[in-house]
Amino acid sequence: MYKNKFLISVIGLFIIVSVLSAKDYQASMFGIKSDGMTLNTRSIQQAIDFISEQGGGRLVFYVGRYLTGSVELKSNVVIRIEEGAVLVAVPSVYDFKGVEGHTALIYAEKQQNTGIGGKGVIEGNGDAVKASVDEQMQKGYLKGDVSAYVPSLIYLKDCENVQMEQLILQHAGNTSIVYENCRNVSLSDLIVNNQTTGKKAVSVSGCENLKMTNCYFDTTVTPLESTGDSQNLTFIKCITPDGNPVSCDK
Amino acid sequence: MKIKVVLFICLFQGILSLSAKDYYVTDFGVKADGITLNSNSIQKAIDFVNEQGGGRLVFTSGNYLTGTIYLKSNVTLHLETGATLLGSTNPWDYVKDPYIKWMSMIFAVKQQNIGITGKGTINGRGFETANNMVSYIHRGLLVDPLKLDRPNETNRPQNIYFRECENVTIKDITLRDPASWNQTYDQCKNLLVDGIYVDSKSYWNNDGIDVVDCDGVVLRNAVIDAADDAFCFKSHDVNHICQNVVMENCVGRSSANGLKFGTVSRGGFRNFKVKNMTIYDTYRSAITFAAVDGGLIENIEVDSVRSIHTGNVIFLRIGDRWSNGKQPMMKDIVIKNVYAEIPMDKPDAGYNYEGPIEDLPRNISPAGIVGLPDHKIQNVTLQNIEIVSVGGGNPYYAYRGLTPAELDSIPEMRTAYPEFSQFKELPAWGFYIRHAEGITFDNVTFKALNKDYRPAVVLDDVQGAKFKKMRFEEPESVGKKQIFPYKSKNVVIE
């Protein structure tokens, strides 16, 4: 009994230490600008890479508009978009990239222990981005399917232990959140608003142990989709504006 | 003959570029508002023009903010009057190329038929970029030794870095304010640089132009104002050589040297013809040829130079810095039709990033030809030269007499960085020549405006020297012996 208590307190201490050591890095430290005009793509990427190399931590955005193109999330790095902070997608098609042709504002492949949270906003700028794609297609500089060029907000492939919480995700030009072959992921307290763009909120395929709690989906189409074999998907209190619960129906 | 071929190729390139198709960069979503960072859109445009077989990518009037872009084969960036490629001041927006291991705004690696033309500007805004980088280093975001409180030059973006490219045309553009050296052409073949204006004194080390190990170069009608060397030819690679170069009608200002070979001089420099060059307000030498890293300097002709208000006019130096056993060599140099004025004051006073005051105390330093005992500088002809020096050497301020002990006390400085002032006080006010063979002075005038305690010319270990039609003017110097040979043979004074 005594031994158990000791063990528990050691484990508890260990947890506290590891939480404390998840260091916070403020965006400004990396020269990231909150003016809504400066394109921060490479600064944010530099910040993520640096924090990852340091063993992990949180990259915290406070009040302001942070213009960016695609950035790649890395293991042990958590992005915090605090209340009043907006991560804004730049309305220019050539600033996006992703994994295997699937572009997204924030993307990751084979990363662990990561996440995005905070009470802030991810602004997809979907209509403007799509206009940029349309224009370039019309001029013949881009070829193929429009949707291949319009980015999702978040695209994760083969990732593990990812928490997404509290965010407002809006105006995605493509499905807001796409998870492929991910394990042990949770999405909670999200508000997804794609009214103007008419895109889906979440797409899941081949995932294992996915839990979605307390999410509000304001879309003109069925908000969720599941393709491929997923296992152990849980949906608690996820609703549409009319109060109807939603879940992934295959 | 070779030079004619180069000129012909350049002309041919010119005709080619005229007939190529024009694309407008704004069509690719690029914004000329000075706010939108366009790197990716400009890159898309370059890639597209390249894929279509080539043409000009035209920038109309406006400010185009960008980070690193890569120029591709058969693409010419054409900057119209009023168009500026504006460098991002965020160091993260630049790429350190993994192959070249330098940073730059515009890279090209192993591309052919490329160019940057037009009356527009490339403005690196390097002072701000470099200072932003310094603050990142202090925050621990970037590892750099921050030697002398500046980031390493390879960690600061240049405006242009082209490597292993063929048929390169740089014409009419203005280049300004890089964070590092300004424009480097490294192991390129057939390079034409014509009619450019360069203002490159926004940060330490900023050169005007660096031509490194290139073969077939025409550099003409360039005006360069630089913190570091203005017209700089280098040889980084022991297996390459900078050769077959025509440079004409160029004007330079520098807080280092006007025309410089080196300092990195591993392979060497061969077959140069330099004509009509004006160097002014320049802290060090109008002309410095340095073979200090085992390379050779051979068959060089410099014709028609005005060197006004420069610290020194000519400095030829063999050293043994990074030779790694390779034998340095300098021979067959002709410098003719030169008029030079050497002032008392600091020639670059008031310019940004003034040269550091060094090697004091010394009176006005002479021009120099300084080899090594085991590597003599061979066959140098100086013809139709007039050097007007302020003179006035004061023996109580600094003194180097003419006794064997005093002359032998001048250090060889084999491994030192080569500069005309490196030996501190020298025993001549006009020309100091040591460890050389076959020196010819023909119709050379030395004028000192003030009486100097030293003779005009001192020779030390010179095997074969001929002085024809020499004139010396110095106040209160009647009967003064102005040429002093020491340990020298076959010195003929006509």
Image: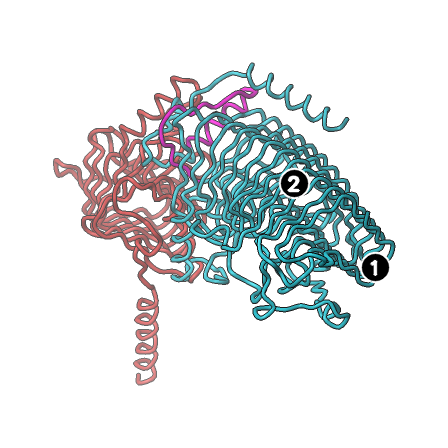
Residue found at the very far top of the displayed protein: B19
The hue used for chain A is red
In the rendered image of the structure, the colour used to display chain B is cyan
Q: Position of residue A165 (x, y in %)?
A: 25, 51
- SS at mark 1 in the image: loop
Q: Is residue B489 magenta?
A: no
> Can you identify the residue that label 1 sits on?
B488
Give the amino acid type for the residue marked by disc 2 in the picture: Val
State the separation of the CA atoms marked 1 and 2: 26 Å
- In the drawing, does residue B142 fall left or right of residue B424? left
Quarter of the image for the N terminus of chain B: give it. top right
Vertical position of residue A86 compared to residue B323: above or below: above
User: How many callouts does the rendering have?
Assistant: 2
In percent of width and height, residue B339 lies at 62, 41
**Residue B256, visible in the rendered structure:** yes
Decide which of B3, B65 is in the foreground and name it: B3
Horizontal side, residue B460 vs residue A22: left or right: right
Instruction: Please state the extent of the stretch shown in magenta in the rendering.
Output: B41-67
> Judging from the image, what secondary structure is the residue with disc 2 in?
strand
Counting from the top left corner in percent of width and height, residue B122 is at 45, 35
Q: Residue at x 20, y 38 (%)?
A: A217
Residue pushed farthest bottom? A2
